Amino acid sequence: MSDRVNSLIFGFHAVFARVRHGPKSVSEVFLDKKRRDARIRKLEERLNESNIKVSRCDTERLNTMVPGVSHQGVVASIKLDDNVSKIEDIIVPAPESQLLVVLDGV
């Protein structure tokens, strides 16, 4: 049995940062086939250097993969260790109000 689970991340900066800092954890990147701008070309170049599979697809497929979010035409399938917790697993229902502070890049 595998000790890795797949998850999706989306958005140019999130995917580019993951490719830059943890390329071995990225299984495949899905790019909007209509996007050919400089940022996408730079990302594609980095993906090729890292030997990460790239799939070009239409916007509708990306919207289906990550519904209701602004994916910017970039979605990546990544591998997570089984021991990585999801926020839903950490937060438990409580009778009182809870305060959750999430710090990113601090």
Image (cartoon, rainbow, N blue to C red):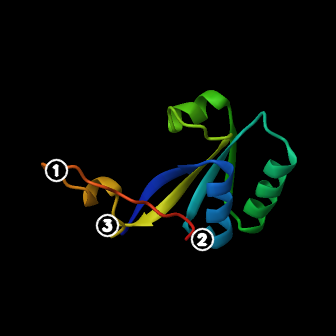
The nearer-to-camera label among 1 and 2 is 1
Badge number at residue 22? 2
Mark 1 vs mark 2, CA separation in Å: 38 Å
Label whose residue precedes the other's in the sequence (1 or 3):
3
The three-letter amino acid code for the residue at tag 3 is Met
The nearer-to-camera label among 1 and 3 is 1
The residue furthest left is: 95
Mark 3 vs mark 2, CA separation in Å: 23 Å
Residue beneath disc 3: 1
- The image shows residue 20 at horizontal and vertical percentages of 68, 69
Circle 2 packing at 10 Å, graded few (<14), some (14-19), many (20+), is few
Q: Is 69 in front, or is 43?
A: 69
The three-letter amino acid code for the residue at tag 2 is Gly
- The image shows residue 21 at horizontal and vertical percentages of 63, 72
Marks 1 & 3, CB-CB < 8 Å contact: no
Marks 1 & 2, CB-CB < 8 Å contact: no
Badge number at residue 96? 1
Residue at image point 68% right, 59% down: 16
The three-letter amino acid code for the residue at tag 1 is Glu
Mark 1 vs mark 3, CA separation in Å: 40 Å
Q: Secondary structure at mark 2?
A: loop
Residue at image point 31% right, 55% down: 99
Q: In which quadrant will I find the N terminus? A: bottom left
